[in-house]
Amino acid sequence: MINFFKKISKRFLRIFRDESGITLIEIMIVVSILAILGTLVVPRLMDNVKKAKVSAAKTDLKTFSTLLDTYYMEFNAYPTSEEGLKKLVETGKLKNTKTALNDPWGHPYEYRSPGENNPQNEYEIWSNGEDGKPGGEGFNADIKNWE
């Protein structure tokens, strides 16, 4: 068995010794293929990151809604617009981290009580999306708890 491996290894060594190396054209072909793959794959990965941020913002809004309902049960009122979501931190319902009240893009979540856009909601929470401005489409669209 050992002789078998010696013979095979000698053959491979002979094959590799005969090779003169990689040519410039071969390197250029490989680089071109990698560039083409990069232009196809990178945008898809970036869209997945953006979709994950939108999903995280929606989850945050649900979490805030649950915490606000808990706050209401304890104090028989929702925080005012002036008190905002900071009241959840002050009462210990939400842990005070640097980004607890910011959306995934780093902008502060907006809060209003009483709500204006949906009479059934006592409060409204929203994120202005990726661009941080009201309105917008796609990833720049607002993410609201009343829609």
Image (cartoon, helix red, strand yellow):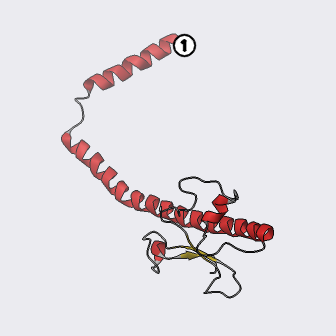
Q: Is residue 27 left or right of residue 60?
A: left
Q: Residues within 10 Å of mark 1 (few under 14, many from 20)?
A: few
Asked which secondary structure carries label 1, the reply is loop
Which quadrant, please, contains the N terminus? top right
Using residue 95 as the reference point, say whether residue 33 is left or right of it: left
Q: Is residue 92 left or right of residue 81?
A: right
Q: Residue at x 33, y 50 (%)?
A: 34
The front one of 146 and 94 is 94
Residue 98 to residue 107: above or below? above
Identify whether 28 is placed above or below 101: above
Which image quadrant: the C terminus?
A: bottom right
Q: Residue at x 41, y 57 (%)?
A: 41
Looking at the picture, tell me which residue is in the foreground, 72 or 83.
Answer: 83
Task: Check the image and name the residue furthest to the left.
Answer: 24
Residue displayed at 53% across by 53% down = 98
Q: Is residue 69 left or right of residue 88?
A: right
Where is residue 54 shown, x and y percent of the image?
54, 67
Q: Residue at x 50, y 61 (%)?
A: 48
**Horizontal and vertical percent for residue 75?**
77, 69
Q: Position of residue 8 (x, y in %)?
A: 43, 20
Residue behind mark 1: 1
Give the residue type that dot 1 points to.
Met
